[in-house]
Image (cartoon, rainbow, N blue to C red):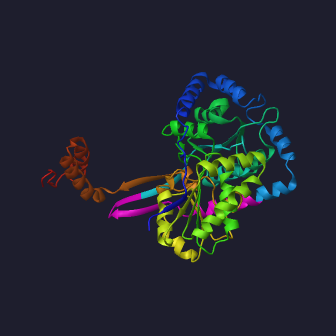
Amino acid sequence: MTREYLKKATLTAESGASKTHEIVTKILGDIEAGGDATALEYAKKFDGYDGNVLLNADDIAAACALVPEKLKADIRFSHDNVKRFAEAQKATVSDVQLEVVPGLIAGQKAIPVDAAGCYVPGGRYSHIASAIMTVTTAKVAGCRHITACSPPRPDQGINPAIVYAAHICGADKIMAMGGVQGVAAMTFGLFGLPEANILVGPGNQFVAEAKRILFGRVGIDMIAGPTDSLVLADKGADPHIVATDLVSQAEHGYNSPVWLVTDDRALAETVMGMVPDLIADLPELNRENAFAAWRDYAEVILCADREEMAACSDDYAPEHLTVQAEDLDWWLDRLTCYGSLFLGEETTVSFGDKASGTNHVLPTSGAAGYTGGLSVHKYMKIVTWQRSTREGSKKVAQATARISRLEGMEGHARAADVRLAKYFPDETFDLTADG
């Protein structure tokens, strides 16, 4: 049986993005040339805010005082979970050394990048959790300086809960600036900040394009598109929970794809019947986003069996992958392409998005086929080193000289030759390419 589309998307994540590159390129060029003053001009134009760009201690204290104690407790709970998981991830990387051949030792070191720039969305929604996810992992990794950047609201500044989260998670500076201008300020080291070595965090299409353009000059977590989610469900799944989970992710934005893959036609039809009513029950802004995402980007796919469902999921390589089906261990072993996996109805993408400990900055648009999400590892450089005794270098030098000459790289060969001549003057070596 081939895959049957009970609902097919009419648009893709690339639809309508043709002008974004041009706009972002101009803004980045203007700010790099004009520095702080130009960044402030763009901030006034797009953010409508003229308060402090870098929050001082009094600004932070005032913002934190506005956050209700119950919300503070929830933020601390989330931070603790993310921190513990990040610490466990860091423990999987260690410095090592190995005697490759007698006398030649090679090693690995994990070195955190110096300065991290963490973008925290605050436009359509105030992404408190993004401050937790990005700043906490950078802190655990050991970055010397962490800037948290978030768009302010006119006459209000950054959402106080974002300020509180960034502060307790370890941000060294909190910058009230959004969009491309915020990304540019961190990259170019404006307002006295160190130039960022890496940019992380989600954002709209302009933020994502700025990171794409700047990649190479700085590191980035990943090239991101609109968030996407896929649910794998069999006949035993609860259709109301399946439909709710799809709608919960569709509310991210008008162009956020959600996909249902199932081997049960009745379940698919029931879920498709429920979704419109669940969307209609959302608040207005959320409703508009979810309605457009479901109408234009959502798909419902009927497969023959669970193996075909798994193959379909791997082809899509979703950012978020939920399994609501029997035999969860089989799915865990079989599935290979996803940003983060949620096994069973007892967990949900929303848990990972907010508080369960795994990171919510994840690969989108099929990138889960080749990379995972944000972790402490993204902030760390895995570098190598070596040292050798003279005797230990003998065989390596001979092999190097012959391989180099075979490749036509005589300069490389001579770097080996001179060591053999110096260290072993009484010996003769055959260092020709043909042996």
User: Residue 357 at what x, y percent from top left?
Assistant: 67, 61
Q: Nearer the viewer, residue 72 or 335?
A: 335
Q: Give the range drawn in magenta.
A: 77-106
Q: Nearer the viewer, residue 296 or 360?
A: 296
Tell which residue pokes out farthest to the left in this image: 434
The image quadrant of residue 43 is top right
User: Residue 91 at what x, y percent from top left?
Assistant: 57, 63
**Residue at 77% in and 31% down:** 52
Side of 423 relative to 96 (left or right): left
**Residue at 21% in and 47% down:** 407
Q: Can residue 26 be seen in this view?
A: yes
Residue 123: within the magenta? no
User: Residue 244 at what x, y percent from top left?
Assistant: 70, 61
Number of disc labels: 0
**Eyeballing the image, is 432 above or below 336?**
above
Q: Nearer the viewer, residue 422 or 338?
A: 338
The image quadrant of residue 191 is top right
Q: Is residue 338 visible?
A: no
**Residue at 56% in and 50% down:** 379
